Image (spheres, rainbow, N blue to C red):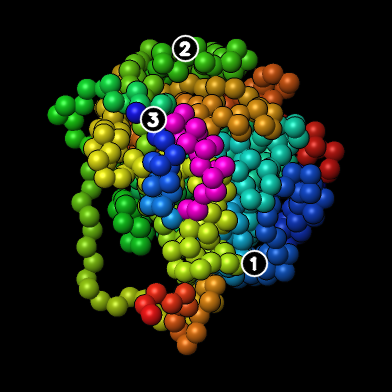
Amino acid sequence: MSLNLEDVSRIALLSRIELSAAERETTRDQLNDILGFIEQLQAVDTAGIEPMAHAVDVVQRLRPDVVTETDRRADFQAVAPETEAGLYLVPRVVE
Amino acid sequence: MSELINSSLRELSAALAAKTVSAVELATLFLDRIERLNPALNAFIALDRDQTLVQAQAADAARRVGAGAPAISPLCGIPLAHKDIFCTRGWRTSCGSKMLENFVAPYDAHVVEKLAGAGMVMLGKLNMDEFAMGSSNESSYFGPVKNPWDLACVPGGSSGGSAAAIAARLAPAATGTDTGGSIRQPAALCGLTGLKPTYGAVSRYGMIAFASSLDQAGPMAKSAEDCALLLNAMAGFDARDSTSLERPAEDYARGLEQPLAGLKIGLPQEFFGAGMDDDVRAAVEAALAEYRKLGAVTVEVQLPNSGLSVPAYYVIAPAEASSNLSRFDGVRYGYRAPDYADLAEMYSRSRAQGFGAEVKRRILIGTYVLSHGYYDAYYLQAQKIRRLIAADFKAAFEQCDVIMGPTSPSVAFAFGAKSADPVQMYLSDIYTISTNLAGLPGMSLPCGFGRNNMPVGLQIIGNLFDEAKMLNVAHKYQQVTDWHTRMPKLAEVAK
């Protein structure tokens, strides 16, 4: 299947990436090229094959539920675009 | 002093131990070379002479106090540089992106911690494809890195800054990361030795995530022996990485001198078909002949699903990238657009302006293949094919000890040659991607020169946890060849 401009707009919205009208057109063509290339996967018979996420069969480790980190809020917020009184500032969401 | 630019890490270590050179002198030697040569290469994107020299002074002090004590790492006082994907406390960590142009990491990556703990001295941070997405270093926000063998050619990617820095002898060693070939392909294109360990062997903590089920850090240097020493310091369990493997520590240099008589080298017919350039084929065949002289035998093996590795990768890697890169929203760190009407626009503009074209393309593809109605058809199907690819390797390793083939289908190509066509660029990693999908260790070592006197890389793929064996196989070859000691003219004249 191939994507149209409306599909591209929907994907861009889901991705939270603004695209101009011109960018939408080149993006459509490039995404269709890439999707055309990965389309060959559909022809492979994978009935009964388990999906693989990790090369080594390991179980998820658990750790005791105790505090291990020290408070470094000031360090972490020093790299934020905008903070005030220990809070991250963003445009008003609720009027 | 200047002869030290081509010394092995063991030789540098011996010189430091014998006090014929100090860590400060070594750091100064390389910093001066960087100052002279980097403007032409663009390999380093962050330098801080004062911080480097403070680390070097500390290494000298540690060697004075601990002379002869077993606690001193052989690497203490040796300079290295980090790919800018690793968080380094107090240094800018940009990941090659405008998004993180002003990001000074508040903590160190595990790998950075471990190498600093060994007393290695950081020379600076190395340029890379933006968020490690690229095979040519043309996607860096800070401009492309040039290949020291030919400034009109790409150094490979994404660890292109690491490769160019070592090739030009601006650093004796560097870190790299490899999601689909990003250590091995630039190592091949710049004439170096680089190793991607088994997935989970080196902690991903503090390494900016691209595709988490594939990303793995590894060493880049001139020789296999150098890589073994570096891997000794880099590998090991880390509870902060949920996929880090709990295994007893091992000495990756322990088997370097093992003779290769009887070694079975598997040659996948899929790696020797059409698609490989003739000059690459000739150099790889010559290397195989050398291995037969060393007593190894070659057997043909099959990796029937390897042709599916690139398309499977371009589902899995973008899918994971789209999820990982959702954290860059202009709120807690990174770039924020100057103008926006509301929160939604702040997100979408910050991301539109902060990310480059290739990164956006991959986020969009990844978002699509994970979206409602397509997840099973793309992501799940790709993960199933991933298992088929891993099963091929498992069967192949029943017939051989290591697998060999080319690292890259061609020598370094010219800037712009593939940048207009994403799919062509993706195919640069056709021989390296399957190892990442299978989680296996892979390495590249120089095995000669091809067209225009550009380096060719031989790839060695090992079974899970067989790094020591691969390093042994590479080391024995490097004892009877001198490709790994060759350096570009640019590095020689600048002595």
In this view of the protein, which residue sits in the foreground, B92 or B291? B92
Q: Is residue A25 magenta?
A: yes
Identify the chain of the residue marked 2, using the numbered disc in the image.
B
* Residue B447 falls left or right of residue A27: right
Circle 1 marks a residue in which chain?
A: B
Q: Residue A63: where, in percent of width, then height?
A: 23, 66
The residue beneath circle 3 is A2
Amino acid, disc 2:
Gly
Q: Considering the numbered disc 3 on the image, is that residue within a helix, a strand or a loop?
A: loop
Residue at image coords 67%, 19%: B450
Specify which label sits upstream in the sequence, 1 or 2.
1
- Dot 1 alpha-carbon crowd within 10 angstroms: few under 14, some 14 to 19, many 20 or more: many
Residue located at (42% from left, 26% from top): A37
Give x and y (percent) for residue B148.
Answer: 73, 37
Residue B68 within the magenta-colored segment of the rendering: no
The residues tagged by marks 3 and 1 sit, at their Cα atoms, a distance apart of 55 Å
Q: Nearer the viewer, residue B458 or B368?
A: B368
Which residue type carries mark 3? Ser
| C-alpha gap between disc 3 and disc 2 | 31 Å
Residue at 73%, 21% in the rendered image: B452
Which quadrant would the C terminus of chain B be assigned to in this image?
top right
Q: Which mark is residue B273?
A: 2
**Rendering quarter of residue B159:** top right
Mark 3 or 1: in front is 3
How busy is the neighbourhood of tag 3: few (under 14 within 10 Å), some, or many (20 plus)? few
> For the residues carrying marks 1 and 2, which lies nearer the camera in this image?
2
Main structural element of the magenta stretch: helix, strand or loop? Answer: helix
Q: Residue at x 53, y 59 (%)?
A: B349
How far apart are the alpha carbons under marks 1 and 2? 49 Å
The label on residue B55 is: 1
The answer to whether residue B426 shows anywhere in this view is: no
**Which three-letter amino acid code belongs to the residue tagged 1?**
Gln
